[in-house]
Amino acid sequence: MTLLNPGANRGTMDVRRPRPFLKLMRAVHKDGTHQPSAIVRGLPPHRSGPLTRKKNAGRATLVYGADRPVAIPGDTVIFTAWIINRSASHLRDVTLVPRSFTNEGMEVLRYTSEPVERDLRIRLLAPGESVMRSFTYLVTDADHIHGGSLVSAMQVHASCRGQVVFDENDAIVSLSGARKDWPFPADRAGLPLKRRKNSEQPVPA
């Protein structure tokens, strides 16, 4: 919109712009880096962080261990797995999966007793609930010859809110202890032997 000044000299035209328009133009051109198209009203300021949090997918916790830290041939080791739902959501199709069981010689071992297949599956585990499953193993002379440790690996997985959650843990039992019928003191067990002169009996080194 333009206004003519009737008091101006003839042959000249005085063009005046409305004050609101002038204020807007000054605000736009005050900083040369800003363009008029950058002025947007009614939109919230931009946020770099996520606007919503992901839903809690639940948590299946596996606590796994053996009933003794050291074992010798003839000992029965009991491995116990506790499956705990430490979330506020129900866990479905909970499954306990024996991963591996080996001695120091990397021989694949079999548990002396273990739960049947159907007992390794729990259809539903409510928040705060837990279940326990046990495995046993009879330590053999062959295990003790290798020394080192027995290592049992276990895993649990479940479904929660359409997502798969899991946990895993290892139970380790040392085989460095001496046998009950070992002919030498326990502190000499596993050490190399040497022979006495004029004797056929080996003695500790």
Image: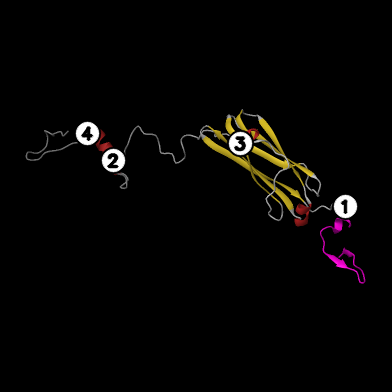
Q: Main secondary structure of the magenta part?
A: loop
Up the image or down, 203 lies above or below 24; here it is: below
**Comparing marks 4 and 1, which lies closer to the viewer?**
1
Residue 196 magenta-drawn?
yes
Q: Are marks 1 and 3 in contact (CB under 8 Å)?
A: no
Q: Secondary structure at mark 2?
A: helix
Number of labels in the image equals: 4
Q: Nearer the viewer, residue 55 or 197?
A: 197
Q: Earlier in the sequence, mark 1 or mark 2?
A: 2
Residue pointed to by mark 4:
18
Crowdedness near tag 4: few (<14), some (14–19) or many (≥20) residues, C-alpha within 10 Å: few
Q: In 3D space, how far apart are the residues under numbered discs 4 and 3 (Cα atoms)?
A: 76 Å
Which kind of residue does numbered mark 1 sit on?
Asp
**Comparing marks 3 and 2, which lies closer to the viewer?**
3
Q: Which residues are magenta?
A: 182-205
Q: Are marks 3 and 2 in contact (CB under 8 Å)?
A: no
Q: In 3D space, how far apart are the residues under numbered discs 1 and 3 (Cα atoms)?
A: 41 Å
Residue 83 x, y percent position in the rendering: 66, 35
Q: Secondary structure at mark 3?
A: strand
Which kind of residue does numbered mark 2 sit on?
Ser
Identify the residue at horizontal 63%, vertical 43% (top origin).
168
Q: Secondary structure at mark 1?
A: loop
Which kind of residue does numbered mark 4 sit on?
Pro
Where, by quadrant of the figure, is residue 19 drawn? top left
Residue pointed to by mark 3:
95
